[in-house]
Image (spheres, rainbow, N blue to C red):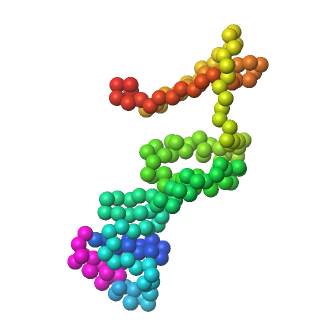
Amino acid sequence: MNHSSIVLYLDDLVIIDSSWKEQLRSLECVFKTCLDHGLILSSKKCQLESHELDFIGHRITASGIKPLKEHLEAIKNMKTTSDKTELKRYLRMVNFNVMFVRKGSEILAPLYKLTSAKVDYEWSDQEPTLTHYKPGSKLVLVTDSSGHAVGGTLYQEKEGVFSPLGFFSKSLQGPDL
């Protein structure tokens, strides 16, 4: 099919046209091609004159493309993963919708690092505990920056163990850049 308004993906087909006249021409092309090749369309899957539809895991409307609500709910309600296999499954699910999140890949980068065979996997419900400052102890400040943000962690060292005293991060905008 060489019709520009027809999108075919595996066994799903969508016709996108801006007028009813164009839609009829496209439908005629699809029906003729199906007849010529002995293909049968499922009446249960057919929608005519729809202004929105779910297609390959997304909601397509006249105003744009959105993630399916059930996909977002599944991500939101997923329990904390207990191993790398579950984390990889979670990342595949999230990655399917990452195009809807500004800088989504950057946000997910620390989780992708956990999937490496070289990294010990540890993900717990426990948040880091900030240590009370002990006067005279060695302090270490670790900072990082990018073109749009800065961050840092202040650690206190005692007998080779570094415990966080505090974390800092800030997005940079306008004159801060």
Quadrant containing the N terminus is bottom left
Instruction: Indicate whether 32 appears above or below 66.
Output: below
Task: Say which residue appears at 45% left-offset and 52% top-offset.
Answer: 99
Quick check: 86 above or below 138?
A: below
**Residue 118 visible in the current orientation:** no
Q: Residue at x 63, y 19 (%)?
A: 140
Residue 176, percent from left and from top: 38, 25
Is residue 23 located in the magenta-colored stretch of the structure?
yes
Q: Position of residue 20 (x, y in %)?
A: 24, 76
Q: Classify residue 173 by image quadrant.
A: top left
Name the quadrant containing residue 30: bottom left
The quadrant in which residue 67 appears is bottom left
Taking the spot 22% from the left edge, 77% from the top edge, the residue there is 21
Answer whether residue 149 is visible to the viewer in this image: yes
Which residue: 51% across, 29% down? Answer: 169
Camera-side residue: 40 or 63? 63
- Name the side, left or right, on which 130 lies relative to 2: right
Which contiguous range is marked in magenta?
18-30
Q: Is residue 99 left or right of residue 30?
A: right
On screen, residue 169 above or below 42? above
- Pick the quarter of the image with the C terminus: top left
Main SS of the magenta segment?
helix
Q: Residue lying farthest right?
A: 159
Taking the magenta stretch, the answer to whether it contains residue 171 is no
Q: Nearer the viewer, residue 67 or 143?
A: 67
Position in image of residue 150 (x %, y %)? 49, 28
